[in-house]
């Protein structure tokens, strides 16, 4: 029998699936998806070191070395103080909290506002919730990515959100994942935003303790005609945490989707963002900031697929790498043959603060239409020595001067975050890092 990369992990996942099969396959539609996901893993394995999409981020090797993937039924208590200190100060939101992959009603808010319906994925599966069955793996395609397949195989918890047509949710929905033990967590969020509806969703993953952990989270977001959805991804986990995020979005006519990804800490983080503009008049905005130190490794892979005419996308990712950290950016824009009158723009800019920090960046643009306005590009360099000298000549200490210049570098991404508590949260971390 042929052995694949990550074979030991796949063997353990297969055993866990068999042990929990009755619970995981209670919904027949989802059961079929899980079986296809298992088949994909068994037949293809996990990404190996030479796999093109993961060549700068050998997540398989890191997981084999640090995560056991054994079934863990241990219950760990978490206090209210533990939960609240991991939230964002001053942010008024509906908090939905998951502890070690299980929904915790004690630390969650009741979502009683008209126009929004929430259910934990586990309950939705048991109740044969129509939305769960309809969206589960519809956009993420577990047969196209091994880590999505891993998620579809074992994810039995997450958030099912339905925003009714013409509704505007009054405050953000904050999905909070807290892990307390050395284990792997698989969660799937299914979000359907109805026609002309508006909603903001924030996701944050944290680990309590120093033991290594792995979180694998998939978001499948459907944005209907005229709707406006915003999604924030805040990554500020421990130095021993491993995380992979897959966000898959489909947009209908005249809809707007905004993604804000802020990566601040973690041992190894991989963010996959895939947006399909499937109708005319769509707008997509992607903002990313990665501020890395130590040995943190963050890989951002984005895909924007323009499938129909008269659509717009704008992508801005900026990175600051310190110490021995490593950043990766791979942004792809596809403009299909029918997507005339497309406007698509992409920019990636990076600053390296040490000789040991590295970044690998690869902007890509593929156009099959002939009446478009598109641009893409990247820059990598160090702080402007003349600007630094100018500030220091006016009595500003070097650390403070560097912090001022880096704040200015990151300012346009931070401004795009819009929510003041999140802006303040990111600003405070930047300040504490750069003015050490």
Image (cartoon, rainbow, N blue to C red):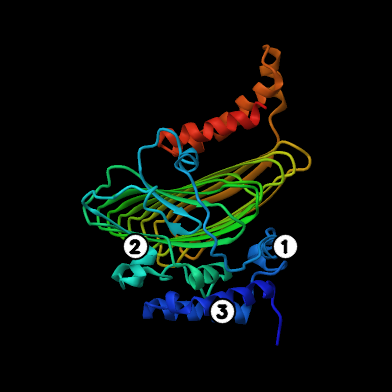
Given the current orientation, which residue lies at the most extreme top position? Answer: 395
Quadrant where the N terminus lies? bottom right
Please identify, in this view, whether the residue under mark 1 or under mark 3 is nearer the observer. 1
Report which residue position mark 1 lands on: 65
Q: Do residues under tags 1 and 3 come within 8 Å of each other at their CB atoms?
A: no
Q: Residue 220, image x and y in percent?
A: 42, 62
Q: Residue 296, image x and y in percent?
A: 67, 47
Q: Nearer the viewer, residue 136 or 17?
A: 17
- Specify which label sits upstream in the sequence, 2 or 1: 1
- Label 3: how many residues lie within 10 Å, few (<14), some (14-19) or many (20+)? some
CA distance separating discs 3 and 2: 31 Å
Q: Residue 205, image x and y in percent?
A: 51, 50
Say what secondary structure mark 3 lies in.
Answer: helix
Report which residue position mark 2 lands on: 279
Report which residue position mark 3 lands on: 40
Is 73 on the left or on the right of 3, as rendered?
left
Please tell me which residue is depicted at 69% across the width and 29% down the height of the picture.
384
């Amino acid at each position: 029998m042929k052995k694949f990369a990550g074979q030991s992990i796949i063997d353990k996942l297969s055993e866990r699936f068999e042990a929990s099969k009755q619970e995981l396959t209670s919904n027949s539609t989802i059961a079929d998806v899980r079986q296809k996901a298992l088949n994909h893993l068994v037949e293809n394995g996990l990404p190996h070191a030479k796999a093109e999409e993961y060549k700068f981020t050998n997540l398989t090797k890191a997981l084999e070395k640090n995560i056991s993937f054994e079934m863990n039924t241990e219950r760990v208590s978490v206090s209210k103080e533990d939960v609240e200190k991991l939230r964002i100060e001053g942010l008024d939101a509906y908090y939905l909290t998951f502890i070690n992959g299980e929904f915790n009603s004690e630390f969650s808010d009741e979502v009683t506002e008209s126009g929004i319906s929430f259910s934990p994925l586990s309950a939705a599966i048991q109740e044969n919730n129509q939305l769960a069955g309809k969206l589960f793996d519809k956009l993420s395609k577990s047969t196209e990515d091994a880590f999505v397949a891993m998620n579809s195989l074992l994810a039995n918890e997450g958030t099912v959100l339905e925003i009714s047509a013409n509704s505007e949710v009054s405050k953000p929905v904050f999905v909070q994942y807290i892990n307390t033990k050395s284990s792997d967590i698989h969660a799937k969020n299914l979000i359907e935003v109805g026609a002309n509806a508006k909603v903001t969703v924030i996701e944050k993953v944290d680990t309590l303790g120093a033991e290594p952990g792995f979180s694998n989270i998939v978001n499948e977001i459907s944005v209907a005609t005229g709707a406006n959805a915003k999604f924030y991804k805040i990554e500020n986990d421990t130095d021993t945490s491993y995380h992979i995020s897959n966000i898959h979005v489909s947009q209908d006519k005249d809809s707007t989707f905004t993604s804000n990804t802020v990566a601040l800490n973690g041992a190894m983080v991989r963010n996959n963002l895939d947006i399909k503009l499937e109708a005319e008049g769509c707008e997509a905005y992607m903002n990313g900031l990665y501020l890395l130190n130590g040995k943190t490794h963050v890989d951002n892979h984005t895909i924007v697929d323009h499938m129909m005419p008269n659509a717009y996308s704008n992508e801005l990712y900026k990175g600051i790498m310190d110490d021995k950290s490593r950043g990766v950016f791979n942004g792809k824009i596809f403009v299909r043959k029918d997507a005339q009158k497309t406007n698509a723009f992409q920019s990636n800019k990076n600053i390296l603060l040490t000789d040991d920090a590295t970044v690998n960046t690869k902007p890509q643009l593929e156009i099959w239409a002939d009446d478009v306005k598109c641009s893409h590009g990247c820059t990598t360099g160090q702080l402007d020595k003349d600007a630094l000298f100018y500030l220091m000549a006016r009595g500003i200490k070097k650390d403070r001067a560097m912090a001022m210049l880096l704040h200015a570098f990151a300012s346009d991404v931070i401004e795009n975050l819009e929510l003041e508590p999140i802006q303040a949260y990111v600003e405070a971390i930047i300040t504490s890092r750069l003015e050490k």
